[in-house]
Image (cartoon, rainbow, N blue to C red):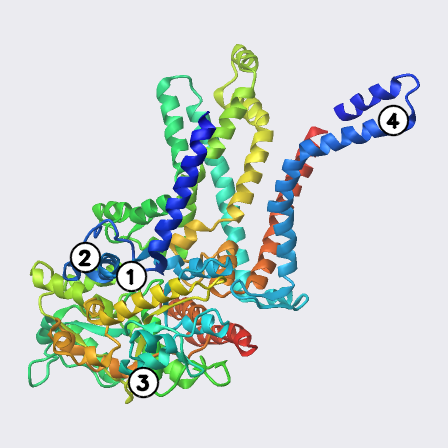
Amino acid sequence: MKMKTLLPALMLAAMLGTTAARAGTEITLFRFFGGCSDAYANVTDVSKAVGECGIVQVLTNKFNAENTDGITVKTQSVEWGVYYDRLSANVAGRTPPDIAVMHRSVLPNYQVRNLLLPLGKDFAAVGIDVADFVPAAREGVTANGEVWALPFDLHALLWHVNADLFIRAGLVDEKGQPKLPRSPAELMQHAATMKAKTGKSYFAIPSGADPMPSWQYLTWVWQQGGNIVDAQKKEALLESKESREALRLLDALYAAGFANPQHDYASAQQAFLAGEAAVLVNGTWGVDTYAAQAATGKSGLKNYVVRDMPSLYGREAVWSDSHTWVMPKQTKPDAAKQKAALTFLKFLNDNSLQWARTGHLPVRASVLQSARMRALPHRAEYTRTATIATALPPIQYQRALGDLLVNELNSTWLVQKDPDKALADSQRAAAAILRRSRRR
Amino acid sequence: MSVQATSVTPAQAPEAGSRNGSLARHRNALSGYAFLAPFLLFYGVFLLYPFALGLWMSLHDWEIVGDFREYIGFLNYVELWDDPYFWEALKRTLQFAAMTAPAATLLGLVLALALQKPLRIYAALRAVFFASNIFSVTVVTLVWAMVLNPDRGLIANGLRAVGLAPIAFLADKDWAMPALMVTSLWWTAGLPMALFLAGLQQIPPEVYEAARLDKASRWAVLRHITLPALARTTLLVVVLQTVMHLQVFGQPLLMTRGGPANSTRPLVQLIYETSFRDWRSGYASAISTVLFVLMFGVALLQFRLSRQEGE
């Protein structure tokens, strides 16, 4: 008896289920940036959102609530540390998401293996203007004359500055602004002055198991006109004279006590906010947080300013990467979902300015130059970063190379590993990583 | 045994042809296998097949994403031999297991001896000490990362209170490994304790009574009665702990990421990174094979030792 009533009910439910699916299109979005769907459960007003997670979440909410095509974007938020491992696993298991966030540095891995949809024509069709992207961003997502991703931002290393400490140390220019060094020798001199006059460290750098010093190292390698890989020959160049010099400078700073090698991300940030260090080396993503902290008047940091990476070796360059959005190839392509995904990407691109509120630089030239952009706090202080932003050439396995640098470079100040030995070991390991990328 | 015993019955029936008998035996064997089938299926699908696939993968350049596979013979093993990261990880893994397994055994034994009393408070304490075992590695590492934090951690505050400088345990090459060990001990000592408690209950109370009549000291009782009676349990605990700690992964991954300067990266983390970050699943399979041989060796040792003891 029970069966008789249950069966029609199930069939009805199944039918309703399919009609519901037909009425709207549900697409999956894979991202990091943290999970905050509860904190922003029904918020669709983007101006109320703060930080990377908040802004991307509220943008998604807004799109779901307001789009007229019945599209629902279902977010799958993955913890940052395992994000790419999860994405790889999903692609390997042939259940890739419809949209995924991907660093520009990871893009070549997927693009070379033909795992992504080319997007150039589709962008033109939905009205995403590729010509509006700043060159650095456009180059990052272009390969073989085709566009493979929607660049969403440019994030780069900055020097976050406690201006009060610079004033106390007398390191100011004629306008009373913090004076930044223009050569390695000048940097050491300034750092010594800072220590002598204020008793504080010049630098706070996340140095334990953090990639921050290796990004500073890359910056200094590029400022000398060198690189750590030869993009054409796909060979590692870690024992070059530029590489040795960049590492020498880092080690000299730690050895002289101008930066605390024991700092991790949280404690370096803490030291800067407490007014214990004059310069925090960190990315664009920190700007709004530090500005907010300084504005409270309660932290040791009162007079916060931001500076573009100073050039110590003549050339201008600063480490950078980009968040981009890709559409992985599906085993069973679904035209409706593809169209829905593109509609969402167009929406994200239209809201480039909102995302820039995180501190990241927008990639659309029109937004970058807009008055609203310049009105955001401190943005006028690091306008050069968008033009001097530099990245590794589009080679595969950049995450492996990055981790390798963290391992080897950080050993030189954490456990006093001989710098030459560290670079030789890196060179050997990098050669093994790059060998495979030469084969395809 | 029972299969054979029942198969004899029809053969004993008069006039039953041998064909009939073999048919019955066949049928019995068949039903036997049918009963085994679920297990064999699971064993095959979840153990034999992945194991064979792992060996097969270790002979290839095999990428986890995409479909690039290329047979390269033993090249992965040759590269492994020359890879200082592998040797470093192997050394760290052995170091960790060699320190943690005996310590966990000893701690488990001490806890079991201290808590094997009938009062309710001891039952509660047993539950408390076992409880840490059921936490996930994420929770455990989070708690210990807070305890060990050089700025605001429990230990740092304690050290400051007595006028000592706090230590950055997880960023210090000499302290990172011991810190991981302590975390692991806190997490896993509950299981050896439970095994030892079970072992203690197997010892007949008469033996202790006799010892009391002989006025044996507590030390003599421990040395000549308790410990010998626990020999088999101890062996089991040591082997289980060794095999378990050879596979250490979550603690270093979450607390030190293998650092500082590679000083805490175990084999499983290397396997994970090689396969998922670098997409070199073939090479990772070769490392897994080495780890398997290592654990298999430990298990064989236990097998030999327990058999010797049986004789």
Residue that mark 2 sits on? A44
The three-letter code of the residue at mark 3 reads Gln
**Residue A181 place in picture, x, y as percent:** 20, 82
User: Between disc 1 and disc 3, whose residue precedes?
Assistant: 1
Give the position of the C terminus of chain A as an image quadrant. bottom right
The nearer-to-camera label among 1 and 2 is 1
Q: Do the residues at pointers 1 and 2 share their chain?
A: yes
Q: Tag 3: Cα neighbours inside 10 Å, few (<14), some, or many (≥20)?
A: many
**Residue B202 place in picture, x, y as percent:** 56, 20
Q: Tag 4: Cα neighbours inside 10 Å, few (<14), some, or many (≥20)?
A: few
**Residue B197 place in picture, x, y as percent:** 49, 25
Chain that bears disc 4 = B
Task: Using the image, tell me which numbered label, if any, was put on residue A223.
Answer: 3
User: Between disc 1 and disc 2, whose residue precedes?
Assistant: 2
Residue that mark 4 sits on? B20
Separation of marks 2 and 4 at Cα, in angstroms: 79 Å
The three-letter code of the residue at mark 1 reads Asp
Q: Secondary structure at mark 1?
A: loop
